[in-house]
Image (tube, rainbow, N blue to C red):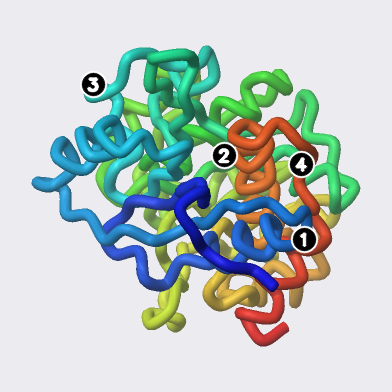
Amino acid sequence: MWTIDAETIVTGVLGHPVRHSLSPAMHNAAFRALDLNWVYLAFETTPGALPDAIAGVRGLRLRGLNLTIPHKQAVMPLLDGLTDAAQQVGAVNTLFWDGEQLVGDNTDAAGFLHALHERGIEPTGQTVLILGAGGAARAVAYALLQQRCQLIVANRTLERAQQLARAFTATPLAMTPDALKPLLNQLDGVVNCTALGMTPNTDSCPPIEWERLPDTAWACDLVYRPLQTRFLQGASARGLTTIDGLGMLVYQGALAFERWTGVPAPISTMRAVAEQALGV
């Protein structure tokens, strides 16, 4: 029987909003599967409260944390150090202790590549369109750049696309049908890193004309509520290989789990719990 006592080790996630997160269910199932006396909690944390929250992590010596929207970049100056991945991505999704140093890591990039490989996609040298310019888009850009991909970044605000493009040697575009149309036939893949299509706004969708993409192209959506967004439905109707947001969620969580515990994550358990929560 799983109990919480004075020896329980505490981890969790900071975000705003965060009550929709599947991470508590995934991590707590993983702890139980390995008989670890650990617990993972969701901490609703407004942007203004983030410095106090990180001070609390230090004072309470919480073992590890995940960061989600809107904290992945704002947390960086509050830490003692960054891993190479976090520094190059420019965003943090995982905190851990290195001795007395509270360090930021990024497991989103590696989690994204795991999700692609799981679907049989090897992106090395491909031309990929990234939709969005936030922390998730930065992780995807970093991961694909390590695979020597040619990157195009499109965002509703062109200035933000230009900022990300400068950091990752990409081509910036406005995310409009007219701007995207001429390049769609050149793409090997497209990744939606925006919140378009996420519950409750399930009717929204990036402006992609799927019939213009090559037959061999693939499409990935980082949204996982719902798993089958309008974006993925359009790609699937075109006959393209699709990757939903669950794989990246599970793999980035598994890498954080292993960073904290030092033991292999029970990935099948984490995925099963996430699927159950999503009604799959």
Query: In this figure, which residue is indicated by the disc labeled 1?
Result: 33
Query: In this figure, which residue is indicated by the disc labeled 3?
Result: 77
Query: In this figure, which residue is indicated by the disc labeled 2?
Result: 108
**Up-down relation of residue 127 to residue 174 (above or below):** above
Neighbours of disc 4 within 10 Å: few (<14), some (14-19), many (20+): some
Separation of marks 4 and 3 at Cα, in angstroms: 29 Å
Query: In this figure, which residue is indicated by the disc labeled 4?
Result: 114
Residue drawn at 54 percent across, 60 percent down: 23
Separation of marks 2 and 1 at Cα, in angstroms: 23 Å
Residue 142 versus residue 189: which sits nearer the camera?
Answer: 142
Say what secondary structure mark 2 lies in: helix
- Which residue in the rendered view is the most extreme toward the bottom? 279
* Amino acid type, callout 3: Pro
Which dot, 1 or 4, sits closer to the camera?
1
Separation of marks 1 and 4 at Cα, in angstroms: 22 Å
Quadrant in which residue 233 is drawn: bottom right
Residue 159 shows in the view:
no
Which dot, 3 or 2, sits closer to the camera?
3
Separation of marks 2 and 4 at Cα, in angstroms: 10 Å
Quadrant in which residue 260 is drawn: top right
Q: Earlier in the sequence, mark 2 or mark 1?
A: 1
The reply, left or right, for residue 10 in relation to residue 46 is right
Say what secondary structure mark 4 lies in: helix
Look at the image and tell me in which quarter the C terminus lies.
bottom right
Residue drawn at 36 percent across, 42 percent down: 134
The reply, left or right, for residue 2 in relation to residue 208 is right
Q: Earlier in the sequence, mark 4 or mark 3?
A: 3
